[in-house]
Amino acid sequence: MVNFVNKKYQVITYGCQMNVHDSEKISGILETMGMSKTDDLKLCDVIVFNTCCIREGAEDRAYNNIMALRELKKEKPDLIIVVCGCMPQQKEGKYDFKKKLPFVDIVIGTYNIGMLKSYLTKFDIEHRKIYEVFDKPISNVEVLKTVRDDDKNAYVNIIYGCNKFCTYCIVPYVRGRERSRDLDEIVQEVKCLVDKGYKYITLLGQNVNSYGKDLQPKTSFASLLNTLCKIEGDFKIKFMTSHPIDFNKEIIKVMAKQPKIAKSLHLPVQSGSNTILKAMNRRYTVGHYLKLINFAKKKIKNISLSTDIIVGFPGETDKDFQDTLKLIKKVKYDQVFAFMYSKRTGTPAAEFENQIEEKVKKKRLNTLLRTQKFIQTDNITKCFGKVYNALIRTDSGVTVGFTDGGREVYLPSDNVTDEIENTFQNIRVETIRNHKLSGSIIKGKK
Ligand code: SAH
Ligand code: SF4
Ligand code: F3S
């Protein structure tokens, strides 16, 4: 191939927002080399699989899709296939890429994604497979160019890695210990994105609330939020993910005070049973969690709440599961991301003896999703008469206000002028029909 200019690429992503953003950086590296994106796999000269290993299902999906490329590689031997991200980073992963996927050309982990250009160039010259997974981060992956997928929301890394070691979770083993990003670098990136017209800036980290503990001088997440809110412009800040042990009242007060912080909070609880939380090494109780939620509800009007829940964790009894149902009914989340516990080799919970049968996990998951559906429907009816600050966007003649919690509120066309397009406005929900909200802008107020 010799030269990558005018070649075509595709990046296929699995997993969390962190991975989505890593893929945006990978696209940036490839475009800096002169390549351009294509939707047609057959036209690709380079295909990158950025993988996830949080659950077995995520691994199987990626593996099967990589496998499906075997034929294309036969037809097109010059095609370069790269596998990177969390799957190769595992010490004892389910799939050994070297043995099982011999047609993959380059395999790298999570720490050396930033070196992709040199790997591609080396492969192009030597035509020898590259398999390089580092044990530790060399430096944080910051790149010259990022090709962002969304024109409204931009992701910004603030902290990498995780120190929490929840007993079910593979992340600390594949992403390393916590490393906060330099404050000035974050401020510069956010300023740049706001200047480019992004309306939502989502701060990313496995545990954003730990931000700054490892920096010199030490700083805090609440302080970072206050600093970012001083940046001029019409934009809002979101963040994920928070951990109930580091998320605190100070952060809630900043969220309440600063109009530039979105009024939505993703606070993973994982279980409503103290016994299970302890076995998960989550280090908080249901009581502590509910205190935070209640404080947030009190301080932040119309806050939208979401969470993650694992069902069928080893040792989870029917009573434990009922406690989780009780908790979701109490909090009344707008969204629950629920997962069946998946054994991850190398994590403590994989060795626990009291594993739960698949069919019990499935049943619990379905019960939980059904319960949550009722809660969500009920939450929609409660929107009636409420005022939300929302981003106004028109597409194909239809104008919608997007609330911080991601609800769509339809606006009648006589309510919309050119000046308000792409700005945040206060809107009141006036009708709810078939779960669809419509409303109007409250004039003269922002
Ligand atoms: N750092 C975040 C997100 C981690 S991964 C946090 O602390 O919440 C996203 C979610 O995947 C987790 O919140 C958890 O609910 C789920 N998860 C992680 N490991 C899992 C496993 N082994 N089986 C099932 N779900 C898991
Ligand atoms: Fe995994 Fe727990 Fe870290 Fe989240 S806080 S990434 S669930 S170990
Ligand atoms: Fe998956 Fe890695 Fe994210 S395991 S959830 S892509 S940190």
Image (cartoon, rainbow, N blue to C red):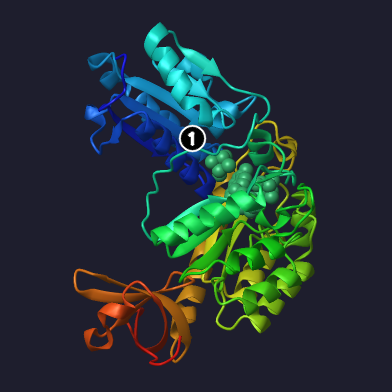
Q: Position of residue 44 (x, y in %)?
A: 27, 28
Q: Position of residue 73 (x, y in %)?
A: 29, 18
Instruction: Tell me where residue 271 sits by quadrant.
Output: bottom right
Q: Which residue appears at 59% of the width and 28% of the height?
A: 89
Q: Which residue appears at 70% of the width and 65% of the height?
A: 222
Residue 259 higher or lower than 19, as above or below: below
Report how many numbered discs are placed on residues in the image: 1
In the rendered image, the quadrant that contains the N terminus is top left
Residue 229 higher or lower than 259, as above or below: above
User: Does residue 265 appear left or right of residue 379 in this picture?
Assistant: right
User: Does residue 243 appear left or right of residue 440 in this picture?
Assistant: right
Asked whether residue 97 appears in the rendered view, the answer is yes
Mark 1 Cβ inside 8 Å of ligand 3: yes
Asked whether residue 311 appears in the rendered view, the answer is no
Q: Position of residue 281 (x, y in %)?
A: 78, 50
> Looking at this view, is 346 or 387 the one in front?
387
Q: Which residue appears at 51% of the width and 71% of the height?
A: 334
Residues packed near mark 1 inside 10 Å, few (<14), some (14 to 19) or many (20 plus): many
The residue indicated by pointer 1 is 51
Instruction: Tell me where residue 106 sits by quadrant.
Output: top left
Tell me the amino acid under the disc marked 1: Thr
Residue 341 higher or lower than 120, as above or below: below
Find the residue positioned furthest to the left: 396
Residue 271 higher or lower than 292, as above or below: above
Q: Secondary structure at mark 1?
A: strand
> Looking at this view, is 74 or 61 the one in front?
74
Q: Position of residue 58 (x, y in %)?
A: 49, 39
